[in-house]
Image (cartoon, grey):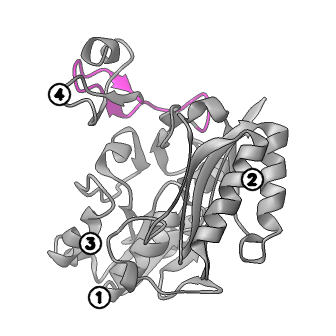
Amino acid sequence: MGKVVLFYVFAPLADPEAIRLWQRALCEANGLRGRIIVSRHGINATVGGEIRAVKRYVRALREYAAFKDADVKWSDGSAEDFPKLSVKVRDEIVTFGVPDEVEVDGDGVRGGGVRLSPDAVHALLDEKPDAVFFDGRNAIEAEIGRFAGAVVTPAKTTRDFVALLDAGEYDHLKDRPVITYCTGGVRCEVLSAVMRRRGFGEVYQLDGGIARYGERFGDRGLWEGSMYVFDRRMHLDFSDATTRIGRCAECGAPTSNVANLAPPQDRELAVLCEDCAPAVAP
């Protein structure tokens, strides 16, 4: 039986390279695969393997003081959901392209949005019905799942958000309560701070992201569709009653399936149903 864990921690790291070497050795010793990014701002990781090995990894992770309170999100999966183990040091643990704009202390990102639990999101919407969800993910992810009524940007990469905000594309939201959300919460830690620095007055972030919301409410809440994930599973459903809100780019059928297009666009993702995906991307 296998599991995949997703987590991030924003904390000042004096020696990211030492953390990289430790993380690689820890994963290799436990037969885990996945993707780990380390920077001076912290760590962002998704790894999978045999359940006992993943538990050993998480226990060892939390023995390091800066990571002891990591909010680890679990889902079904295995090492086979990843092509390899990748552990890298980068300027940012989530690449918005503004590493010098991100300030981190022992409590995380400075100047970010107010964290809201899934239940607190509902309470806020009851109190402030003009609040709006703001999707902090790439556009392709939102095609198969998003919060009802959410603002979805045309962003193809995380770097696109800063340019869109600086261009004033969403200035009309500056006087409204904005609830940012993403898969596990890491992108919104930075996005909410970036938005506040650009004049958005009342910014919140869904603590734990879509993953935590799905654990709490499944398909009974405000979430619609499937959650896109960055591994071979491609998406996760929160119940057997998940609605397929994506539409196949070839035939228009409802689907949550995401696949690579055929050459010469084979590095570009598209929503393609299982019947059309093999024909387009053999």
**Mark 3 or mark 4, which is nearer the start of the sequence?**
3
**Mark 3 or mark 1, which is nearer the start of the sequence?**
3
> What is the span of residues highlighted in magenta in the rendered image?
238-256
Residue at numbered disc 3: 162
* Nearer mark to the viewer, of 2 and 4: 2
Which one is in front, 41 or 230?
41
Q: How far apart are marks 3 and 2 (CA)?
A: 35 Å
Crowding near the residue tagged with mark 2, few <14, some 14–19, many ≥20 C-alpha atoms within 10 Å: some
**Mark 1 or mark 4, which is nearer the start of the sequence?**
1
Residue in the image at 62% along x and 34% along y: 239
Q: Is residue 222 visible?
A: yes
Residue 39 lies, in percent from the top left, at 52, 71
Which amino acid type corresponds to the residue marked 3 in the rendered image? Answer: Val
Crowding near the residue tagged with mark 1, few <14, some 14–19, many ≥20 C-alpha atoms within 10 Å: few
Residue at numbered disc 4: 264
Q: Distance between the residues labelled 1 and 2?
A: 42 Å
Crowding near the residue tagged with mark 3, few <14, some 14–19, many ≥20 C-alpha atoms within 10 Å: some
Q: How far apart are marks 4 and 1 (CA)?
A: 41 Å
